[in-house]
Image (cartoon, rainbow, N blue to C red):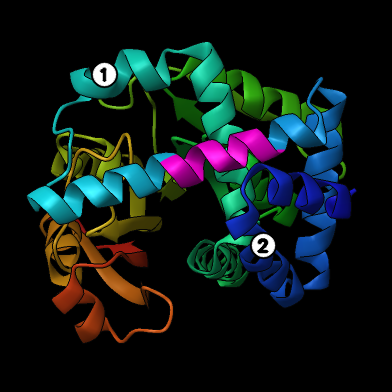
Amino acid sequence: MIEELVEAIGQKNPRQRRPVEAALSTLHDEERRDLSAWVRHALSRGNSATSLAAAYDLVVRDTLREQVYFRRHGRYRHTSFADVASDVYFSPVYMQQYMEGLALTGFFWENHVVLRRFLLHALARLPRVRRYLEVGPGHGLHLAAAARLGCAESFEAIDLSPTSVALCNDLLTSGALGALPAVHVREADFLGADVDGPFGIVVMGEVLEHVERPDLFLVRARELLSDGGHLLCTTCIDAPAIDHIRHFRSVEEVEALLFDAGLDVIERCVLPHPGLSLAEAAAQRLAVNVGFVARTRPRA
């Protein structure tokens, strides 16, 4: 099944065959099982190896196009939610392809693989909490993996895209990743939604670069977290994409936002462009992926 997908990716974009094969050789056994399970699930929803290869190619080509724009202009193409909302989040056809392609990058892109491990290892080490909230679960793979870990007694998620909510619910109830506890996923804007805390864990995976006011998202997360609760988040620096509207320029910039929101970083994962040091990536303005585990400071 995976081999058929790799063959389809190679036919769609020959330049991607070797990187994908190399990525597969580095996956842990459980990651390969999750990839196989997700592919089977996607096929059961009416996809084919060819359509999944096209979804992956969509993400590759869209990202490359935005990288070229960034290199030429020194800025991201889009800066507001309105610029991308109708063409991405509220376009059912595009959003489904986009989410399917992004799901595959979690297994095929080195930095995405390592960030996934970072988040799951952190969740496995933290004390089990009563309530878990994930903001912007997207395709739902991390949400499902967190639920499978059993890191909380109850799980909730919120996403503004109706397509993402449907994809999450399909995955969570499919049994593809094993028997999971019930997870309540609802469609709403995180800043405007009526969400009742407290939560012991809040997760924001690849969210902050998609919003105009990441500071407000972090403040809202702190409001919903219990004292001593943890925020797990990932984002990126100098990493253009079709719907990235907040351009972070340094690790320190993101950490300052976390601190100002009442969150202290206790663990970080900094992943420069593969093969480069952080300083080299910064000098060349190439993407850096970052992940944080932050603990709430007591309220005054």
Q: Main secondary structure of the magenta part?
A: helix
**Number of callouts in the render?**
2
Q: Amino acid at mark 2?
A: Val
Which structural element holds mark 1? loop
Where residue 264 appears, as percent x and y from the top left, is 24, 68
State which quadrant residue 273 falls in: bottom left
Can residue 143 be seen at all in this image of the molecule? Answer: no
Residue 231, placed above or below residue 220? below
Q: Which mark is residue 68?
A: none
Q: Circle 1 is placed at which residue position?
A: 192
Residue extent of the magenta highlight: 53-61
Amino acid at dot 1:
Gly
Residue 1 position within the rendered picture, expressed as x and y whole percent measured from the top left? 90, 48
The disc at residue 20 is: 2
Residue 174 left/right relative to 281: right
Q: Residue furthest right?
A: 1
Residue 199 magenta-drawn? no
Upstream in sequence: badge 2 or badge 1:
2
Determine whether 175 is above or below 284 in the image: above
Estimate the x, y position of residue 247 in percent, counting from the top left: 16, 50
Q: Residue at x 76, y 33 (%)?
A: 50
Position in image of residue 178 (x %, y %): 87, 45
Is residue 19 depicted above or below 6 in this figure? below
